[in-house]
Image (cartoon, helix red, strand yellow):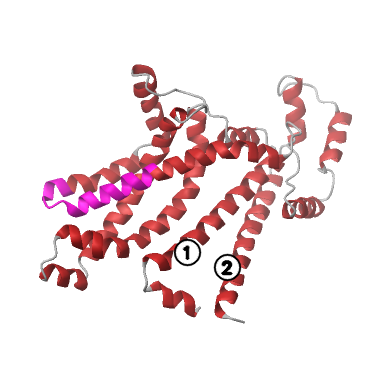
């Protein structure tokens, strides 16, 4: 079997295993919970936790959703449906889980993509400015900015932006998901800590690369600091930043849950909060599968980008 095909099959097998492991782990964790989602759903519809639940109605619903079957049978049934793309129906609303997630996904994807774009632009610019700075004090200030950005809690930053740019100066809408303007404040909230991490990783990698012998040789030949930075150092120093960016994509989706709640956006964040609060097991399982698929896809993309950035990686990759 050719090496490239074997590598592709191995990566595909690892991707399937990651998604399966995430599904199985979430199933075990959710079904170990002591409470009953059917009882919660009936209690909410009846007016609260103190409402009297009809045992016959609860038993009928458990049978309809398959909760009365043995655990292994429930697992295999849900896994078989998930393989075919059928994630079941929400216990709370009865809507298909796939439609529920796909209906909310575009809002969250747009927010995460815009936040990632802002974060990469700000993080790379900050790292480059720190690399170009000659003065000790200026460089120390630029290098300390990412640490401050990482330490800012997202919910606090979101509330601060709301207070300043939505209420004090009404430049952007405070809540909702209509139009590009509604994306700006939540995207900045998500982008600030992400940009700080990108700047930290890329800045550290740039400092190490600028100390390499080939950079010293270029400097001895009279190359300017700007030329060395953009022509020699940036490409070789970008691998760690690309790796951490892949990880941060998953964090952006997770952080969107909090940020979307702060800004009142109806997207995956509100779907997740409702599903977890109501222990809507099919919806939570669907969200876990979605997160695992996103992680796998981003990891594969990051791995594919490595040889494009650093030719030294190509022989190693092709030899596997």
Q: Position of residue 311 (x, y in %)?
A: 37, 72
Q: Quadrant of residue 39?
A: top right
Residue at the location (55% across, 79% down)?
3
Give the residue at mark 2: 11
Give the residue at mark 1: 303
Q: Position of residue 262 (x, y in %)?
A: 48, 28
**What secondary structure predominates along the stretch shown in magenta?**
helix
Residue at the location (64% across, 58% down)?
21
Q: Position of residue 65 (x, y in %)?
A: 81, 40
User: Dot 1 surroundings within 10 Å: few (below 14), some, or many (20 or more)?
Assistant: some
Sooner in the amino-acid sequence: mark 1 or mark 2: 2
* Residue 60 drawn above or below residue 68: above
Q: Position of residue 109 (x, y in %)?
A: 53, 41
User: Dot 2 surroundings within 10 Å: few (below 14), some, or many (20 or more)?
Assistant: some
* Residue 151 drawn above or below residue 245: above
Q: Quadrant of residue 38?
A: top right
Q: Which region is colored magenta? A: 118-139
> Which quadrant holds the N terminus?
bottom right
Q: Are marks 1 and 2 in contact (CB under 8 Å)?
A: yes
Which element carries disc 1, helix, strand or loop? helix
Left or right position of 15 against 205: right
Residue at the location (84% across, 47% down)?
69
| Residue toward you, 85 or 208 | 85
Say if the magenta span includes residue 133.
yes
Residue at the location (55% across, 56% down)?
297
Left or right position of 71 against 17: right
Left or right position of 42 against 230: right
| Badge number at residue 169 | none
Which element carries disc 2, helix, strand or loop? helix
């Amino acid at each position: 079997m050719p090496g490239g095909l074997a590598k592709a099959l191995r990566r595909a097998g690892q991707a399937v295993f990651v998604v399966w492991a995430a599904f199985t782990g979430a199933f075990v964790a959710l079904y170990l919970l002591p409470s009953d989602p059917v009882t919660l759903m009936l209690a909410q519809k009846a007016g609260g936790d103190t409402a009297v639940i009809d045992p016959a109605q609860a038993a009928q619903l458990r049978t309809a959703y398959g909760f009365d079957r043995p655990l292994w049978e429930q697992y295999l049934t849900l896994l078989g449906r998930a393989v075919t793309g059928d994630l079941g129906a929400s216990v709370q609303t009865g809507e298909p889980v796939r439609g529920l997630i796909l209906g909310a996904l575009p809002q969250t994807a747009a927010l995460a993509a815009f936040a990632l774009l802002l974060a990469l632009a700000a993080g790379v610019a900050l790292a480059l400015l720190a690399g170009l700075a000659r003065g000790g004090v200026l460089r120390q200030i630029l290098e300390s900015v990412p640490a401050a950005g990482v330490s800012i809690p997202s919910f606090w930053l979101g509330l601060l932006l709301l207070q300043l740019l939505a209420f004090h100066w009404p430049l952007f809408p405070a809540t909702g998901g209509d139009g590009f303007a509604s994306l700006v404040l939540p995207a900045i909230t998500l982008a600030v800590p992400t940009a700080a991490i990108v700047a930290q990783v890329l800045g550290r990698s740039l400092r190490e690369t600028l100390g390499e012998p080939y950079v010293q040789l270029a400097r001895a030949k009279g190359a300017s600091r700007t030329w060395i930075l953009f022509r020699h150092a940036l490409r070789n120093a970008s691998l760690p930043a690309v790796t951490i960016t892949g990880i941060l994509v998953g964090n952006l989706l997770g952080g969107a849950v909090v940020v979307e709640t702060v800004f009142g956006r109806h997207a995956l964040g509100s779907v997740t909060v409702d599903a977890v609060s109501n222990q809507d097991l099919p919806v939570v399982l669907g969200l876990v599968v979605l997160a695992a698929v996103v992680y796998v896809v981003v990891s594969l993309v990051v791995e594919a980008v490595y040889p494009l950035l650093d030719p030294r990686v190509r022989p190693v990759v092709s030899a596997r």
